Image (spheres, rainbow, N blue to C red):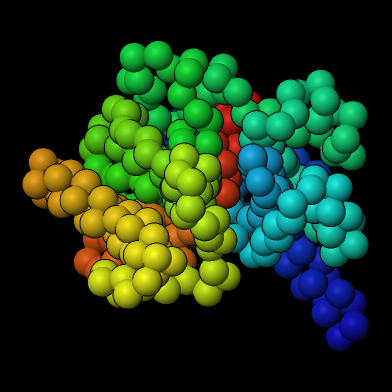
Amino acid sequence: MRKFWGSLFFALLYIPYFRADFDLKETKPQGHKCDENNVNLPNFPVNNLVLDIGNTRVKAGLFASMVLKEEFSAKELGEVLDYIRQKDWQFAHAIVSSVRYDQEGLKEKLFFPFLYLDHDTPLPVDNCYESPRTLGLDRMAAAIGAVSNVLGNSPVLSIDLGTCITYDFVDGQSRYQGGSISPGLQMRYKAMHQQTARLPLIELESEGHLPDVLGKNTQDGMKSGVLQGVRFELEGLISYYQSQHQDLKVFICGGDSKFFESLTKDHIFVIPNLVLYGLNRILNYNVDKN
């Protein structure tokens, strides 16, 4: 008799979980719509795969709701896909942003269904750019990643230090307003080498640190001009936006963000994989809409 009641207790305990597995629609709150600061997620963990196929690297992230559980990057898409298979990443939904392949090309390469990010993809922010279809989707993803990391309606500035340095501003009403673009670190080194007769080509160091402002030789002078020059550029633009928006939050990301971690202070955060967070937010938004 004791075994019977024990079995009945555990059966009753697990009935809700079986229902969640077989009837996902019932787990969504009714009458709740996604706004600029909240994503309507199921009330149980669902893994998302996000892929950011950039100019020089391919980055992958595995998310549980809004938490980045695991990440991997490589130069080629094939390496990333092999890693995902090897590690047996489990996910219910996927999103891909790519500057190398179009949607049809990706269908031939990927072994799972995915949401392809393009200029027609619904977004959780309003795009107020004058030429919205010319806006780089990686810029928008970084901006949305910044929005997803703040509470309330604070305006955000996302700064992506990649091949180019991009600055993107979203106001307190979740409206993407625009920004600016400047050459990235390696691009500046290449320009000095290619546009002059004698200046050497300098490769970025793997360890991120800023050189002295006062260079004592040609190479150190070039390093100071590039790295310290970008530092002062960052500080100047951040200071300008802060003067216009008192509650501004600033997020610095990208492969070269490691050189500027010293800038981290109140309301300034370094999150290298901010674009992945933005892609995850976009995916959750679209899953919820459907």
Among all residues in the image, which is located at the extreme bottom? 2
State the image quarter where residue 109 is shown.
Answer: top right
Instruction: Tell whether 114 sits left or right of 78.
Output: left
258 up-or-down from 76: above or below: below
Q: How many marks?
A: 0
Instruction: Tell whether 250 sits left or right of 275.
Output: left
26 up-or-down from 212: above or below: above
Instruction: Tell whether 73 sits left or right of 221.
Output: right
Q: Residue at x 31, y 71 (%)?
A: 215
Residue 284 in the image, given as x and y percentages of width and height = 57, 40
Q: Residue at x 32, y 28 (%)?
A: 178
Residue 15 in the image, given as x and y percentages of width and height = 77, 58
Q: Quadrant of the N terminus?
A: bottom right
Q: Nearer the viewer, residue 114 or 140?
A: 140
26 up-or-down from 21: above or below: above
Among all residues in the image, which is located at the extreme front? 197
Q: Nearer the viewer, residue 187 or 163?
A: 187
Instruction: Judge whether residue 246 can be spotted in this image.
Output: yes
Q: Residue at x 37, y 48 (%)?
A: 159
136 up-or-down from 258: above or below: above
Q: Quadrant of the C terminus?
A: top right
Q: Nearer the viewer, residue 102 or 195?
A: 195
Residue 20 in the image, given as x and y percentages of width and height = 72, 49
State the image quarter where residue 176 is shown.
Answer: top left
Instruction: Judge whether residue 274 can be spotted in this image.
Output: no
Q: Residue at x 58, y 53 (%)?
A: 65
Q: Nearer the viewer, residue 63 or 8?
A: 63
